[in-house]
Image: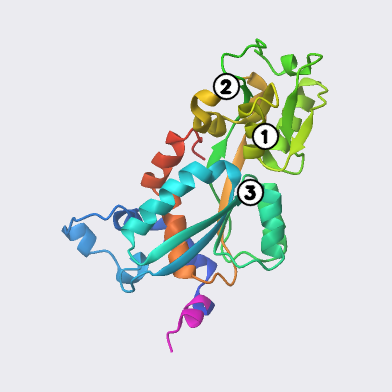
Amino acid sequence: MTTASARRARRTPRTLRAAGAGAAVLLALSACSSSDDSDSAGSSPSASGGSEKLSGTVTVFAAASLKESFTTLGKEFEKAHPGTKVTFNFGGSDSLAASITGGAPADVFASASPKTMKIVTDAKDNATEPGTFVRNQLEIATLPGNPDKITSLKDLTKSGLKVVLCDKEVPCGAAAQKALDASGLKLTPVSYEQDVKSALTKVELKEADAAVVYKTDVNAAGDKVEGVDFPESADAVNDYPIALLKDAPNADAAEAFIALVQSPEGQKVLTGAGFLQP
């Protein structure tokens, strides 16, 4: 009588919010704590998932900018829960949202903007209310050493400079356009890319002189590019929401993964990658 489908049918938004509030309990599991103190013993088995061993695959659709940090968290989750596997589909948030509403099987959606998450919620393909878990800010990525002496957003409008932007439908592209509009600047890029990693790759391969991407992607690229801050980016910071999806094939494990992302341990990994706390 207590099948996985029945458990999902009984799951309510209030129950799921309570599970999110219990992230500290799930953190103890995720960190593989060996502590058996009274506080851990007093945790409710049903709230922590301790009454039932997690197993199976968790499929996470996530914005391309989350690739490095989510990959790290996926490995930590698998270590904390032997018998589980976290698989990722990274890409432009708009494309991922379209795949989800088109019926692609997935457990979790982590988007780079509320606008792209809304595509999923408008289709009622979410099982929980999306919650912002990090924020991200733009930065200009230039060639190593910044040979074109780019110091501002306005410098990207210089004649002859090859600049790449994310497509305007992608969160990083929408944020870049917002910053340009706020500055009254007009910029014609040599290409619009479908996700932030593709835009950054153009600079890494020296196919472009600069790209407007996220700080996290500049950090992840290391010495392949150089980052240039610009003040207008403060007016175009993106919130990143995450949600459990309706008909998630592995809802219990998916909830535990979301709790890890939102936990202090998860936040440490994300802020270490350059994300801002919500």
Magenta span dominant secondary structure: helix
Choose mark 1 or mark 2, whichever is in front.
1
What's under tag 2, amino acid-wise? Gly
Q: Which stretch appears magenta?
A: 1-8
Question: Mark 3 — residue?
Answer: 91
**Which structural element holds mark 3?**
strand
Q: Position of residue 37 (x, y in %)?
A: 16, 57
Residue 121 visible to an observer of this rendering: no
What's under tag 3, amino acid-wise? Gly
What's under tag 1, amino acid-wise? Ala
Judge whether 87 appears above or below 187 on screen: below
Left or right, residue 177 beside residue 79: right
Earlier sequence position, callout 3 versus callout 1: 3
Disc 3 to disc 1, how far (Cα)?
12 Å
Question: Mark 1 — residue?
Answer: 199
> How is the rendered protein coloured?
rainbow
